[in-house]
């Protein structure tokens, strides 16, 4: 793994390059979502982009009267609403499971009292809802709602970071440690933009199969991009005289 200074420089350069390649829309100032709603949005957002998650979440809110109707609906019914988000069925199962756990715990769908806790205590309490809450969801809520510093890491983001050589293979159960190492080099003020850019890049260029390295603005610093460019040069047929 690169030294901290090298990792910080690499990620700073990557964020700058991706910002030029994928200009993000100006963030509109809006009231933060209630904590439960942000958790549900995080389930839509994990493994997707902001645009896709916004559309899926909007469909969910429009299709059902309230969260209790979502809770008592089938996985297929909720999943059908979430499409074309990838893994819509598993997302639906997590959302229904989260709502059921919160309802059984609070007899309501209000988690506002957790906002009054410290960040660490809130994160610990959120992890109590195991059906829908994972490390990504907790980090997302800390970053977007609770005003703390966290970098949510989903599989597309981890894929980009692996290919850049920023992280190596790790135990999925130890994701919090990996996240901490990224948070150490990405300032809090750049965290949301970093999260959004990684997601767009993973969808548009750094795809799982056959990444589009030739079009990638990071290919000169990315070990995978350098390797793929080398292979392409080696297999290029020689011109006959």
Image (tube, rainbow, N blue to C red):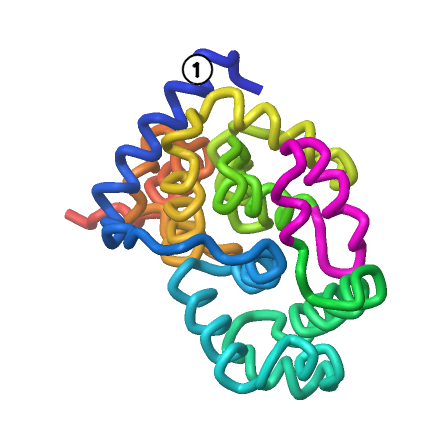
Quadrant of residue 162 within the rendered picture: top right
Residue drawn at (74%, 41%), measured in percent from left and top?
172
- Tell me if residue 43 comes above or below residue 177 in the rendering: below
Query: Residue 21 in the image: x percent, y percent?
Result: 24, 46
Residue 134 pos. (x, y %): 71, 49
In the picture, residue 111 is in which quadrant? bottom right
Viewer can see residue 211: no
Residue 137 appears anywhere in the view: yes
Q: Does the magenta stretch include residue 230?
A: no
Relative vertical location of residue 23 with respect to residue 100 in this rendering, above or below: above
The answer to whether residue 132 is magenta is yes
Q: Where is residue 80 in the image (x, y as percent from the top left)?
A: 59, 85
Q: Report helix, strand or loop for mark 1.
A: helix
Q: Residue at label 1?
A: 6
At 56% from the left and 83% from the top, the residue drawn is 81
Front position in the image: 96 or 121: 121
The magenta stretch is 112-134
At 67% from the left and 80% from the top, the residue drawn is 70
Residue 171, placed above or below residue 91: above
């Amino acid at each position: 793994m690169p030294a901290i200074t090298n990792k910080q420089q690499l990620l700073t350069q990557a964020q700058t390059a991706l910002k030029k390649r994928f200009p993000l829309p100006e963030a509109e100032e809006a009231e933060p979502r209630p904590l439960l709603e942000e958790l549900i949005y995080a389930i839509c957002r994990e493994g997707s982009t902001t645009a896709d998650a916004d559309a899926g979440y909007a469909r969910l809110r429009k299709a059902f009267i309230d969260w209790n109707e979502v809770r008592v609906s089938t996985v297929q019914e909720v999943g059908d609403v979430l499409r074309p988000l990838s893994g819509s069925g598993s997302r639906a199962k997590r959302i229904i499971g989260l709502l059921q756990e919160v309802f059984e715990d609070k007899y309501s769908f209000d988690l506002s009292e957790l906002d009054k806790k410290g960040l660490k205590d809130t994160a610990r309490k959120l992890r109590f809802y195991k059906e829908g809450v994972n490390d990504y969801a907790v980090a997302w809520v800390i970053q977007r709602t609770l005003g703390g510093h966290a970098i949510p890491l989903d599989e597309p983001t981890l894929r980009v970071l692996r290919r850049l050589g920023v992280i190596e293979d790790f135990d999925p159960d130890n994701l919090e440690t990996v996240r901490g190492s990224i948070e150490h080099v990405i300032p809090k003020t750049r965290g949301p933009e970093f999260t959004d850019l990684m997601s767009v890049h993973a969808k548009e260029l750094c795809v799982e199969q056959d990444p589009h390295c030739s079009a990638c603005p990071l290919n000169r610093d990315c070990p995978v991009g350098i390797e793929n460019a080398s292979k392409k040069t080696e297999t290029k047929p020689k011109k006959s005289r």
